[in-house]
Amino acid sequence: MADLLIVNSSSEGYDKTETSYPLGLCYLAAAAESRGLSVGFFDSYREPWSRARGRFEALLRELRPAVAGFSCLSFNRNSTRDAARMVKLILPGTLTVCGGPHATPMQEQILRHYDVDVVVRGEGEETLPEVVEAFKGRSPLSAVRGIGYKADGGVRVTPDRAFIADLDSLPLPKHDLYAGKIGAEGRAYVISTRGCPGRCHFCVSTLQLGRRYRMRSAENVMTEIKELYGKYGIRTFGFQDDALTLNRGRTLEFCERMASAGLPVKWSASTRANAFDAEMAAMMYRAGCRHVAFGVESGSEKLLRAMNKRIMPERVVEAFRAAHEAGLSTGILLIVGTPGESWSTVMETVRLVRRLKPSYVRSVALLQVFPGTHWYEYCRSRGYLDDEYWLSARPVPYYTFEHSELALSFYGFFITFASQWHSSPLRGTVFLFTAIYKYAPRIAKAVLKLFMTIGRRARRGG
Protein backbone atom coordinates (compact mmCIF):
# COMPACT_ATOMS: atom_id res chain seq x y z
CA MET A 1 0.00 0.00 0.00
CA ALA A 2 1.34 3.42 -0.98
CA ASP A 3 0.89 6.56 1.05
CA LEU A 4 0.47 8.68 -2.07
CA LEU A 5 -0.21 8.04 -5.75
CA ILE A 6 0.61 11.02 -7.99
CA VAL A 7 -1.46 11.02 -11.18
CA ASN A 8 -1.00 12.95 -14.43
CA SER A 9 -4.01 11.85 -16.46
CA SER A 10 -4.55 12.13 -20.21
CA SER A 11 -4.70 15.42 -22.05
CA GLU A 12 -7.64 16.02 -24.36
CA GLY A 13 -6.25 18.78 -26.51
CA TYR A 14 -2.58 19.49 -25.94
CA ASP A 15 0.20 19.27 -28.51
CA LYS A 16 1.50 15.75 -27.86
CA THR A 17 4.62 16.33 -29.96
CA GLU A 18 6.12 18.28 -27.04
CA THR A 19 9.08 16.31 -25.71
CA SER A 20 9.50 17.65 -22.15
CA TYR A 21 8.24 15.97 -19.00
CA PRO A 22 6.41 17.45 -15.97
CA LEU A 23 9.17 18.51 -13.59
CA GLY A 24 6.60 19.84 -11.16
CA LEU A 25 5.44 16.29 -10.47
CA CYS A 26 9.05 15.16 -10.03
CA TYR A 27 9.38 17.87 -7.36
CA LEU A 28 6.18 16.68 -5.64
CA ALA A 29 7.38 13.08 -5.55
CA ALA A 30 10.77 14.10 -4.13
CA ALA A 31 9.17 16.33 -1.49
CA ALA A 32 6.79 13.56 -0.37
CA GLU A 33 9.56 10.98 -0.18
CA SER A 34 11.74 13.38 1.83
CA ARG A 35 8.97 13.33 4.45
CA GLY A 36 9.13 9.55 4.64
CA LEU A 37 6.04 8.90 2.49
CA SER A 38 5.90 6.05 -0.01
CA VAL A 39 4.98 7.34 -3.46
CA GLY A 40 3.53 5.72 -6.59
CA PHE A 41 3.30 7.45 -9.97
CA PHE A 42 1.05 7.27 -13.04
CA ASP A 43 1.41 9.40 -16.18
CA SER A 44 -0.80 8.99 -19.24
CA TYR A 45 -0.77 12.64 -20.33
CA ARG A 46 0.28 11.93 -23.90
CA GLU A 47 -1.97 8.97 -24.60
CA PRO A 48 -5.77 8.66 -24.90
CA TRP A 49 -7.56 8.14 -21.60
CA SER A 50 -9.61 5.35 -23.19
CA ARG A 51 -6.37 3.40 -23.61
CA ALA A 52 -4.81 4.38 -20.25
CA ARG A 53 -7.90 3.79 -18.11
CA GLY A 54 -7.33 0.05 -17.71
CA ARG A 55 -3.70 0.50 -16.62
CA PHE A 56 -4.78 3.11 -14.08
CA GLU A 57 -7.39 0.79 -12.60
CA ALA A 58 -4.84 -2.03 -12.33
CA LEU A 59 -2.36 0.27 -10.57
CA LEU A 60 -5.02 1.43 -8.13
CA ARG A 61 -5.82 -2.16 -7.16
CA GLU A 62 -2.14 -2.96 -6.81
CA LEU A 63 -1.00 0.07 -4.77
CA ARG A 64 -4.23 0.82 -2.88
CA PRO A 65 -2.98 4.33 -2.03
CA ALA A 66 -4.13 6.18 1.06
CA VAL A 67 -4.17 9.39 -1.02
CA ALA A 68 -4.47 9.91 -4.78
CA GLY A 69 -3.16 13.30 -5.91
CA PHE A 70 -4.07 14.60 -9.37
CA SER A 71 -2.29 17.21 -11.45
CA CYS A 72 -5.17 19.11 -13.05
CA LEU A 73 -4.64 21.32 -16.09
CA SER A 74 -7.43 22.74 -18.22
CA PHE A 75 -6.29 20.26 -20.89
CA ASN A 76 -6.79 17.14 -18.76
CA ARG A 77 -9.63 18.22 -16.45
CA ASN A 78 -12.08 15.66 -17.92
CA SER A 79 -9.79 12.65 -17.57
CA THR A 80 -8.91 13.88 -14.06
CA ARG A 81 -12.59 13.97 -13.21
CA ASP A 82 -13.07 10.43 -14.51
CA ALA A 83 -9.95 9.14 -12.75
CA ALA A 84 -11.06 10.63 -9.41
CA ARG A 85 -14.46 8.98 -9.84
CA MET A 86 -12.72 5.67 -10.51
CA VAL A 87 -10.69 5.99 -7.31
CA LYS A 88 -13.84 6.48 -5.25
CA LEU A 89 -15.57 3.50 -6.89
CA ILE A 90 -12.65 1.13 -6.34
CA LEU A 91 -11.19 2.57 -3.12
CA PRO A 92 -13.89 4.63 -1.41
CA GLY A 93 -11.67 5.19 1.63
CA THR A 94 -8.89 6.84 -0.40
CA LEU A 95 -8.58 10.61 -0.09
CA THR A 96 -8.61 12.33 -3.49
CA VAL A 97 -6.60 15.54 -3.87
CA CYS A 98 -6.35 17.85 -6.86
CA GLY A 99 -3.83 20.60 -7.60
CA GLY A 100 -2.39 22.48 -10.54
CA PRO A 101 -3.07 25.56 -12.68
CA HIS A 102 -6.69 24.61 -13.39
CA ALA A 103 -7.51 23.50 -9.87
CA THR A 104 -6.19 26.67 -8.23
CA PRO A 105 -8.67 29.14 -9.80
CA MET A 106 -11.50 26.59 -10.12
CA GLN A 107 -11.21 25.27 -6.56
CA GLU A 108 -14.87 25.48 -5.59
CA GLN A 109 -16.19 24.02 -8.85
CA ILE A 110 -13.89 21.01 -8.57
CA LEU A 111 -14.86 20.35 -4.96
CA ARG A 112 -18.56 20.59 -5.77
CA HIS A 113 -18.60 18.63 -9.02
CA TYR A 114 -15.65 16.22 -8.94
CA ASP A 115 -15.11 13.23 -6.66
CA VAL A 116 -12.30 15.24 -5.10
CA ASP A 117 -11.98 15.76 -1.35
CA VAL A 118 -9.22 18.40 -1.26
CA VAL A 119 -7.84 21.04 -3.62
CA VAL A 120 -4.27 22.27 -3.13
CA ARG A 121 -3.77 25.85 -4.30
CA GLY A 122 -0.45 27.08 -5.67
CA GLU A 123 2.77 25.22 -4.97
CA GLY A 124 2.33 21.74 -3.55
CA GLU A 125 5.70 20.59 -2.19
CA GLU A 126 4.86 21.62 1.36
CA THR A 127 1.07 21.41 1.22
CA LEU A 128 0.51 17.97 -0.32
CA PRO A 129 2.67 16.02 2.19
CA GLU A 130 0.90 17.85 5.02
CA VAL A 131 -2.47 16.78 3.62
CA VAL A 132 -1.30 13.15 3.42
CA GLU A 133 0.08 13.26 6.96
CA ALA A 134 -3.09 14.88 8.29
CA PHE A 135 -5.26 12.25 6.63
CA LYS A 136 -3.15 9.33 7.82
CA GLY A 137 -2.94 10.77 11.34
CA ARG A 138 -6.63 11.65 11.35
CA SER A 139 -5.81 15.24 12.25
CA PRO A 140 -8.00 18.11 11.00
CA LEU A 141 -7.46 19.43 7.47
CA SER A 142 -8.37 22.88 8.79
CA ALA A 143 -4.79 23.16 10.11
CA VAL A 144 -3.30 22.85 6.60
CA ARG A 145 -2.81 26.20 4.85
CA GLY A 146 -3.46 26.66 1.15
CA ILE A 147 -6.28 24.18 0.60
CA GLY A 148 -10.02 23.91 0.04
CA TYR A 149 -11.85 20.80 1.18
CA LYS A 150 -15.28 19.25 1.50
CA ALA A 151 -16.85 19.49 4.95
CA ASP A 152 -20.41 19.29 6.29
CA GLY A 153 -21.93 19.23 2.81
CA GLY A 154 -20.10 22.36 1.71
CA VAL A 155 -16.66 23.73 0.95
CA ARG A 156 -14.19 25.14 3.43
CA VAL A 157 -11.14 27.17 2.47
CA THR A 158 -8.04 27.63 4.63
CA PRO A 159 -5.80 30.74 4.46
CA ASP A 160 -3.31 30.97 1.60
CA ARG A 161 0.13 29.46 2.07
CA ALA A 162 3.11 31.71 1.35
CA PHE A 163 5.13 30.79 -1.73
CA ILE A 164 8.34 28.91 -0.96
CA ALA A 165 10.98 31.58 -0.41
CA ASP A 166 14.08 29.35 -0.29
CA LEU A 167 13.98 27.09 -3.34
CA ASP A 168 17.30 25.54 -2.34
CA SER A 169 15.48 24.01 0.63
CA LEU A 170 13.55 21.71 -1.70
CA PRO A 171 14.96 18.28 -2.51
CA LEU A 172 16.12 17.90 -6.10
CA PRO A 173 13.30 16.66 -8.35
CA LYS A 174 12.91 12.92 -8.86
CA HIS A 175 14.05 12.70 -12.49
CA ASP A 176 14.08 8.92 -12.02
CA LEU A 177 10.37 8.93 -12.83
CA TYR A 178 11.40 9.60 -16.45
CA ALA A 179 14.70 7.71 -16.44
CA GLY A 180 13.84 5.78 -19.60
CA LYS A 181 12.98 8.92 -21.54
CA ILE A 182 16.06 10.81 -20.34
CA GLY A 183 18.37 7.91 -21.09
CA ALA A 184 16.91 7.33 -24.56
CA GLU A 185 17.02 10.99 -25.58
CA GLY A 186 20.12 12.08 -23.70
CA ARG A 187 18.15 15.16 -22.67
CA ALA A 188 16.79 16.37 -19.35
CA TYR A 189 15.05 19.49 -18.02
CA VAL A 190 15.73 21.86 -15.16
CA ILE A 191 13.74 24.58 -13.39
CA SER A 192 15.95 27.16 -11.68
CA THR A 193 13.46 29.95 -10.93
CA ARG A 194 9.80 30.39 -10.08
CA GLY A 195 7.42 33.31 -10.40
CA CYS A 196 7.32 36.08 -12.96
CA PRO A 197 6.78 39.80 -12.35
CA GLY A 198 5.16 40.10 -15.78
CA ARG A 199 1.41 40.53 -15.90
CA CYS A 200 0.63 39.24 -19.38
CA HIS A 201 -3.11 38.88 -19.76
CA PHE A 202 -2.95 35.41 -21.34
CA CYS A 203 -0.64 33.76 -18.80
CA VAL A 204 -1.65 31.21 -16.15
CA SER A 205 1.82 30.81 -14.62
CA THR A 206 1.49 33.50 -11.97
CA LEU A 207 -1.70 31.90 -10.61
CA GLN A 208 0.31 28.86 -9.62
CA LEU A 209 3.73 30.33 -8.89
CA GLY A 210 3.12 33.98 -8.06
CA ARG A 211 4.66 37.19 -9.39
CA ARG A 212 7.64 37.34 -7.04
CA TYR A 213 10.73 36.09 -8.85
CA ARG A 214 12.43 33.42 -6.74
CA MET A 215 15.71 31.74 -7.61
CA ARG A 216 17.67 28.66 -6.75
CA SER A 217 21.33 29.44 -6.15
CA ALA A 218 23.75 28.84 -9.02
CA GLU A 219 25.49 26.21 -6.87
CA ASN A 220 22.23 24.34 -6.27
CA VAL A 221 21.41 24.30 -9.99
CA MET A 222 24.90 23.05 -10.82
CA THR A 223 24.48 20.20 -8.33
CA GLU A 224 21.40 19.02 -10.24
CA ILE A 225 23.06 19.32 -13.65
CA LYS A 226 26.15 17.41 -12.51
CA GLU A 227 23.93 14.70 -11.05
CA LEU A 228 21.99 14.40 -14.33
CA TYR A 229 25.22 14.21 -16.31
CA GLY A 230 26.79 11.65 -13.97
CA LYS A 231 23.69 9.46 -13.74
CA TYR A 232 22.31 9.62 -17.27
CA GLY A 233 25.17 11.01 -19.37
CA ILE A 234 22.89 13.72 -20.74
CA ARG A 235 24.15 15.60 -23.81
CA THR A 236 21.65 18.45 -23.63
CA PHE A 237 19.25 19.98 -21.16
CA GLY A 238 16.61 22.67 -21.35
CA PHE A 239 15.54 25.19 -18.74
CA GLN A 240 11.78 25.22 -18.19
CA ASP A 241 11.94 28.63 -16.48
CA ASP A 242 9.48 31.21 -17.78
CA ALA A 243 12.28 33.80 -17.83
CA LEU A 244 15.72 32.47 -16.94
CA THR A 245 17.67 35.73 -17.06
CA LEU A 246 15.56 38.16 -15.02
CA ASN A 247 18.25 38.37 -12.34
CA ARG A 248 21.39 39.34 -14.19
CA GLY A 249 23.85 38.59 -11.37
CA ARG A 250 22.52 35.07 -10.73
CA THR A 251 22.50 34.33 -14.47
CA LEU A 252 26.11 35.40 -14.96
CA GLU A 253 27.22 33.46 -11.87
CA PHE A 254 25.55 30.32 -13.17
CA CYS A 255 27.19 30.78 -16.58
CA GLU A 256 30.61 31.21 -14.97
CA ARG A 257 30.13 28.02 -12.95
CA MET A 258 28.87 26.12 -15.98
CA ALA A 259 31.81 27.24 -18.11
CA SER A 260 34.29 26.33 -15.37
CA ALA A 261 32.75 22.87 -14.90
CA GLY A 262 33.67 21.96 -18.47
CA LEU A 263 30.80 19.51 -18.91
CA PRO A 264 30.30 18.51 -22.57
CA VAL A 265 26.64 19.48 -22.35
CA LYS A 266 24.71 22.03 -24.42
CA TRP A 267 21.57 23.75 -23.19
CA SER A 268 18.66 26.01 -24.14
CA ALA A 269 16.49 28.55 -22.35
CA SER A 270 13.58 30.97 -22.69
CA THR A 271 13.45 34.51 -21.39
CA ARG A 272 12.03 37.99 -21.80
CA ALA A 273 13.64 40.29 -24.35
CA ASN A 274 14.00 43.10 -21.82
CA ALA A 275 16.19 40.88 -19.62
CA PHE A 276 18.79 40.03 -22.24
CA ASP A 277 21.82 41.83 -23.69
CA ALA A 278 25.05 41.26 -25.60
CA GLU A 279 27.24 40.52 -22.55
CA MET A 280 24.74 37.99 -21.23
CA ALA A 281 24.39 36.35 -24.65
CA ALA A 282 28.16 35.94 -24.99
CA MET A 283 28.48 34.50 -21.49
CA MET A 284 25.62 32.08 -22.08
CA TYR A 285 27.24 30.84 -25.27
CA ARG A 286 30.55 30.32 -23.47
CA ALA A 287 28.68 28.31 -20.81
CA GLY A 288 27.23 25.94 -23.40
CA CYS A 289 23.95 27.61 -24.31
CA ARG A 290 23.14 27.21 -27.98
CA HIS A 291 19.51 28.29 -28.20
CA VAL A 292 17.36 30.96 -26.61
CA ALA A 293 13.65 31.59 -27.20
CA PHE A 294 11.78 34.82 -26.60
CA GLY A 295 8.10 35.42 -25.96
CA VAL A 296 7.48 38.08 -28.60
CA GLU A 297 3.73 37.39 -29.05
CA SER A 298 3.02 40.10 -31.68
CA GLY A 299 4.60 42.79 -33.81
CA SER A 300 1.76 45.20 -33.11
CA GLU A 301 2.35 47.75 -30.37
CA LYS A 302 -1.42 48.08 -30.01
CA LEU A 303 -1.82 44.38 -29.28
CA LEU A 304 1.25 44.26 -27.04
CA ARG A 305 -0.34 46.97 -24.91
CA ALA A 306 -3.68 45.14 -24.96
CA MET A 307 -2.04 41.97 -23.60
CA ASN A 308 0.01 43.99 -21.08
CA LYS A 309 3.28 42.60 -22.45
CA ARG A 310 5.28 45.71 -21.55
CA ILE A 311 8.02 44.94 -24.09
CA MET A 312 7.91 46.87 -27.35
CA PRO A 313 9.25 45.66 -30.73
CA GLU A 314 12.47 47.74 -30.75
CA ARG A 315 13.62 46.10 -27.51
CA VAL A 316 12.92 42.70 -29.06
CA VAL A 317 15.07 43.62 -32.09
CA GLU A 318 17.98 44.41 -29.76
CA ALA A 319 17.65 41.07 -27.95
CA PHE A 320 17.62 39.03 -31.18
CA ARG A 321 20.60 40.96 -32.54
CA ALA A 322 22.57 40.24 -29.34
CA ALA A 323 21.71 36.53 -29.50
CA HIS A 324 22.72 36.18 -33.14
CA GLU A 325 25.99 38.08 -32.68
CA ALA A 326 26.89 35.69 -29.85
CA GLY A 327 26.24 32.67 -32.08
CA LEU A 328 22.99 31.56 -30.45
CA SER A 329 20.12 30.18 -32.48
CA THR A 330 16.79 31.84 -31.68
CA GLY A 331 13.20 30.77 -31.26
CA ILE A 332 10.18 33.02 -31.31
CA LEU A 333 6.86 32.55 -29.50
CA LEU A 334 3.90 34.23 -31.19
CA ILE A 335 0.15 34.43 -30.54
CA VAL A 336 -2.70 35.38 -32.86
CA GLY A 337 -6.21 36.18 -31.74
CA THR A 338 -5.67 38.83 -29.08
CA PRO A 339 -8.75 41.10 -28.95
CA GLY A 340 -8.19 43.71 -31.65
CA GLU A 341 -6.29 41.35 -33.98
CA SER A 342 -6.75 42.22 -37.68
CA TRP A 343 -5.05 41.74 -41.01
CA SER A 344 -3.16 44.95 -40.30
CA THR A 345 -1.74 43.65 -37.00
CA VAL A 346 -0.89 40.33 -38.66
CA MET A 347 1.19 42.18 -41.24
CA GLU A 348 2.92 44.12 -38.44
CA THR A 349 3.92 40.78 -36.95
CA VAL A 350 5.18 39.52 -40.30
CA ARG A 351 7.31 42.64 -40.74
CA LEU A 352 8.77 42.31 -37.24
CA VAL A 353 9.60 38.63 -37.68
CA ARG A 354 11.40 39.44 -40.92
CA ARG A 355 13.48 42.02 -39.05
CA LEU A 356 14.26 39.60 -36.23
CA LYS A 357 15.30 36.73 -38.51
CA PRO A 358 14.73 33.97 -35.93
CA SER A 359 16.41 30.66 -36.63
CA TYR A 360 12.98 29.16 -37.24
CA VAL A 361 9.29 29.91 -36.86
CA ARG A 362 7.66 26.54 -36.32
CA SER A 363 4.11 27.65 -35.63
CA VAL A 364 2.00 30.42 -34.17
CA ALA A 365 -0.31 29.74 -31.22
CA LEU A 366 -3.95 30.77 -31.22
CA LEU A 367 -4.95 32.65 -28.08
CA GLN A 368 -6.56 30.25 -25.63
CA VAL A 369 -8.65 31.44 -22.71
CA PHE A 370 -7.71 29.86 -19.38
CA PRO A 371 -9.58 30.30 -16.08
CA GLY A 372 -8.12 32.87 -13.75
CA THR A 373 -6.48 34.94 -16.50
CA HIS A 374 -7.36 38.49 -17.47
CA TRP A 375 -8.80 37.34 -20.80
CA TYR A 376 -11.06 34.86 -19.04
CA GLU A 377 -12.51 37.60 -16.84
CA TYR A 378 -12.81 39.77 -19.96
CA CYS A 379 -14.83 37.01 -21.69
CA ARG A 380 -17.00 36.37 -18.62
CA SER A 381 -17.84 40.06 -18.24
CA ARG A 382 -19.12 40.12 -21.82
CA GLY A 383 -21.06 36.87 -21.57
CA TYR A 384 -18.78 34.99 -23.97
CA LEU A 385 -17.90 32.29 -21.41
CA ASP A 386 -18.92 31.21 -17.94
CA ASP A 387 -17.63 28.77 -15.35
CA GLU A 388 -20.06 26.07 -16.50
CA TYR A 389 -17.95 25.71 -19.64
CA TRP A 390 -15.30 23.82 -17.67
CA LEU A 391 -17.78 21.11 -16.68
CA SER A 392 -18.31 20.26 -20.34
CA ALA A 393 -16.12 17.94 -22.42
CA ARG A 394 -15.28 20.77 -24.80
CA PRO A 395 -11.62 21.70 -25.40
CA VAL A 396 -9.92 24.75 -23.93
CA PRO A 397 -11.51 27.57 -25.94
CA TYR A 398 -9.73 29.80 -28.39
CA TYR A 399 -10.68 33.46 -28.36
CA THR A 400 -13.01 33.28 -31.36
CA PHE A 401 -15.41 36.08 -30.44
CA GLU A 402 -13.98 38.45 -33.07
CA HIS A 403 -12.67 35.96 -35.66
CA SER A 404 -13.46 32.33 -36.38
CA GLU A 405 -10.98 29.58 -35.56
CA LEU A 406 -10.53 29.14 -39.32
CA ALA A 407 -9.58 32.80 -39.78
CA LEU A 408 -7.16 32.71 -36.84
CA SER A 409 -5.60 29.49 -38.14
CA PHE A 410 -5.05 31.19 -41.48
CA TYR A 411 -3.47 34.20 -39.75
CA GLY A 412 -1.07 31.91 -37.91
CA PHE A 413 -0.29 29.94 -41.03
CA PHE A 414 0.36 33.10 -43.03
CA ILE A 415 2.74 34.56 -40.44
CA THR A 416 4.73 31.32 -40.37
CA PHE A 417 4.76 30.85 -44.13
CA ALA A 418 5.65 34.48 -44.91
CA SER A 419 8.48 34.37 -42.36
CA GLN A 420 9.86 31.06 -43.68
CA TRP A 421 9.64 32.24 -47.29
CA HIS A 422 11.45 35.48 -46.49
CA SER A 423 14.24 33.52 -44.84
CA SER A 424 14.47 30.96 -47.65
CA PRO A 425 12.07 30.30 -50.54
CA LEU A 426 13.05 26.63 -50.39
CA ARG A 427 12.28 26.46 -46.68
CA GLY A 428 9.02 28.30 -47.30
CA THR A 429 8.00 25.81 -49.97
CA VAL A 430 8.82 22.83 -47.75
CA PHE A 431 6.85 24.42 -44.93
CA LEU A 432 3.88 25.05 -47.21
CA PHE A 433 3.50 21.40 -48.18
CA THR A 434 4.28 20.15 -44.68
CA ALA A 435 1.70 22.52 -43.18
CA ILE A 436 -0.96 21.51 -45.69
CA TYR A 437 -0.44 17.87 -44.70
CA LYS A 438 -0.32 18.63 -40.97
CA TYR A 439 -3.12 21.17 -40.73
CA ALA A 440 -5.56 19.89 -43.34
CA PRO A 441 -7.61 17.93 -40.73
CA ARG A 442 -7.64 20.95 -38.41
CA ILE A 443 -8.70 23.30 -41.19
CA ALA A 444 -11.44 20.88 -42.30
CA LYS A 445 -12.66 20.70 -38.70
CA ALA A 446 -12.67 24.50 -38.43
CA VAL A 447 -14.60 24.83 -41.72
CA LEU A 448 -17.19 22.30 -40.52
CA LYS A 449 -17.54 24.14 -37.22
CA LEU A 450 -18.01 27.43 -39.07
CA PHE A 451 -20.77 26.03 -41.30
CA MET A 452 -22.50 24.43 -38.31
CA THR A 453 -22.45 27.79 -36.50
CA ILE A 454 -23.89 29.54 -39.57
CA GLY A 455 -26.56 26.84 -39.81
CA ARG A 456 -27.59 27.21 -36.14
CA ARG A 457 -27.83 30.97 -36.49
CA ALA A 458 -29.91 30.61 -39.66
CA ARG A 459 -32.31 28.22 -37.91
CA ARG A 460 -32.69 30.57 -34.95
CA GLY A 461 -33.31 33.44 -37.32
CA GLY A 462 -35.94 31.41 -39.14
Image: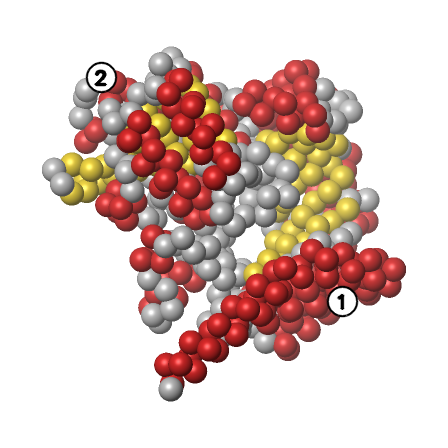
**Amino acid type, mark 2:** Gly
User: Is there any visible trace of residue 461 in the rendered image?
Assistant: yes
Estimate the x, y position of residue 226 in percent, counting from the top left: 66, 19
Query: What residue is pinned by disc 1?
Result: 418
Q: Look at the image and tell me in which quarter the N terminus lies.
A: top left
Q: Is residue 197 above or below residue 450?
A: above
Q: CA distance from mark 2 to mark 1?
A: 62 Å
Q: Could you tell me residue 68's position as x and y percent?
A: 35, 28
Quick one: 299 or 421, which is closer to the camera? 421
Which of the numbered marks, if any, corresponds to residue 125?
none
Mark closer to the chain start, 2 or 1: 2
Q: Residue at x 50, y 27 (%)?
A: 26
Rendered residue at 69%/56% (across/down): 438
Q: Residues within 10 Å of mark 2 (few under 14, many from 20)?
A: few
Q: Identify the residue at horizontal 81%, vertical 44% (top origin).
A: 327
In this rendering, would 193 be left or right of 443? Answer: left
Identify the residue position indicated by label 2 in the image.
137
Label 1 sits on a secondary structure element that is helix
- Count of numbered circles in the view: 2
